[in-house]
Image: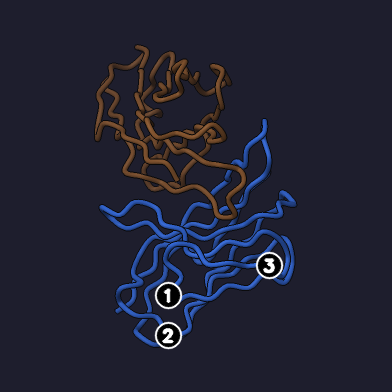
Amino acid sequence: EAQVTQNPRYLITVTGKKLTVTCSQNMNHEYMSWYRQDPGLGLRQIYYSMNVEVTDKGDVPEGYKVSRKEKRNFPLILESPSPNQTSLYFCASSTWLSGANVLTFGAGSRLTVL
Amino acid sequence: DAKTTQPNSMESNEEEPVHLPCNHSTISGTDYIHWYRQLPSQGPEYVIHGLTSNVNNRMASLAIAEDRKSSTLILHRATLRDAAVYYCILRNNNAGNMLTFGGGTRLMVKP
């Protein structure tokens, strides 16, 4: 089944403890991205990657890092998490369909930073 | 990206058609109109997209106004499983980053 898989789905951590949220897609998509979703603010893009070893900042990159060493994986790294990074995170990959980029999202990772 | 305006919420009865409007008066000639939906506790899901002509797929239809300043997502027979937040988004393929989601329309379906 074509899908985007994120892990962990739920995580509670403490301020300053480094964590990584993994994202993997099995559709051979070149483009991948990370979003965070917060009440009243909608979905905001954190980072995106056009292809292997190519990453760029989205709208809210502060406090996050990403890497794209292989096409299928795009982990999100929080080096020193803070409570304002408590959020619902979505990874997505995209492909071309009828002339436009269309996104496939993962199920989400709910992160709480105490 | 050009801005879209959608009603905050709409209600529908089960098995009736639903028309979800979206205004995008500042759309540019190369902007595609995308619709995504987000069911409770799930990630957003692609529904449909179009440029100028009306589009149909297995999930919905997209009606685009002749001047492209508005569009309507049509669910032909709403089911309880269609209760979700529906996002109308404009996107130019030339830009590097991806879709910008606004507030969307929360669709409630009554049995």
Q: Which chain can be seen in blue?
A: A
Total marks in image:
3
Q: Which chain is brown?
A: B
Residue B89 versus residue B58: which sits nearer the camera?
A: B89
Q: Whole-Å distance between the Cαs marked 3 and 2?
A: 23 Å
Could you tell which of marks 3 and 2 lies nearer the N-terminus? 3
- Name the kind of residue labelled 1 in the image: Glu
Q: Which residue is mark 1?
A: A62
Give the secondary structure at mark 1: loop
- Is residue B13 shown above or below A63? above
Drawn side of residue B11 relative to residue A110, left or right: left
Q: Which mark is residue A31?
A: none
Residue tagged 2: A80
What's the amino acid at mark 2?
A: Ser
User: How far apart in space, not on screen, are marks 2 and 1 (Cα)?
Assistant: 11 Å
Which residue is the site of mark 3? A54
Mark 2, other Cα within 10 Å: few <14 / some 14–19 / many ≥20: some
Residue B20 point in image, percent of width and height: 35, 23
* Residue A10, quarter of the rendered image: bottom left
